[in-house]
Image (cartoon, rainbow, N blue to C red):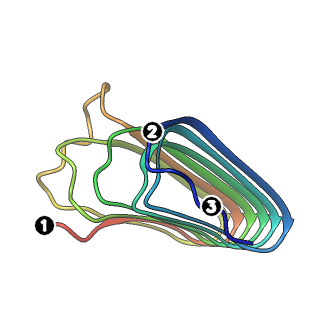
Amino acid sequence: MTIQIPEKELSKLKVNNSVGSIRVSEVTAEHFELYASVGLIEVDEVKGEITARSEVGVIDIKVTELMANIKAHSSVGDVQVTLIEAPVALRHELRSQLGGQSVDLPASVNLNDETAPLVELTTEIGNVSLKSNGR
C-alpha cells in the first residue's frame, strides 16, 4: 500500500502495521510514530522527531540533518541510524542485550551537549549502529 501525503508539515504521522514493511520518505512532521509487529521499518530523509518500534524486524533510519530526537527499538532485529550530514552535537544511548554496538561519528561532533538531540537505539537481539556519512 502506498499513501501520498501533501507537501506540508504535519503535526504527527502515526503508522501501525501488523505484518509487512513500513517505508516513510521525504516527509516533514513534528513527530513520527511508527510501529511494525513483524517487518522492516525504513525511514529516509524525513524531518522531525522519530519514534520507531518493531517486535521482529530491522529498523533503518537515514536523516539528512539531525534536528530532533530519534528513538528506535526492535525486540529482534538490527537498528541503525545514518546521519547524512554530521551534526555539531548529539547525545546517544545504544543498547543491545545480544549483539554488537557501533558508533562512527567524526571527532568534531560534541557528545556532551545536554541540549542536543538524543539518538536512542535499542534491541534485545541484534546489532545497533549510529554513523555519519558526512565528515
CA separation, marks 2 and 3? 34 Å
Residue type at numbered disc 1: Arg
- Looking at the image, residue 17 sits to the left or right of residue 126; the answer is right
Residue 111 vs residue 18, the one in the foreground = 18
Q: Which one is earlier in the sequence, the residue at label 2 or at label 3?
A: 2
In the rendered view of the protein, which quadrant contains the C terminus? bottom left
Crowding near the residue tagged with mark 1, few <14, some 14–19, many ≥20 C-alpha atoms within 10 Å: few
Q: What secondary structure is found at the residue carrying circle 3?
A: strand
The N terminus lies in which quarter of the figure? bottom right
Sequence-first tag of 1 and 2: 2
Residue furthest to the right in view is: 18
Q: Residue at x 25, y 62 (%)?
A: 105
**Left or right: 120 as drawn, with respect to 72:** left
Residue 135's disc number: 1
Q: Badge 2: few (under 14), some or many (20 or more) residues near its Cα, within 10 Å? A: some
Q: In front: mark 1 or mark 3?
A: 1
Residue at 33% in and 40% down: 67
Task: Work out whether mark 1 precedes mark 3 in sequence or the reverse, and give the earlier one.
Answer: 3
Residue 113 x/y as whole percent: 25, 31
Q: Mark 1 touching mark 2, by CB under 8 A?
A: no
Decide: is 33 above or below 114: below
Read off the residue under disc 2.
9
Q: Residue 20, relative to residue 84: is it above or below?
A: below
Q: Residue 60 at what x, y percent from top left? A: 54, 69
Q: Is residue 67 left or right of residue 8?
A: left
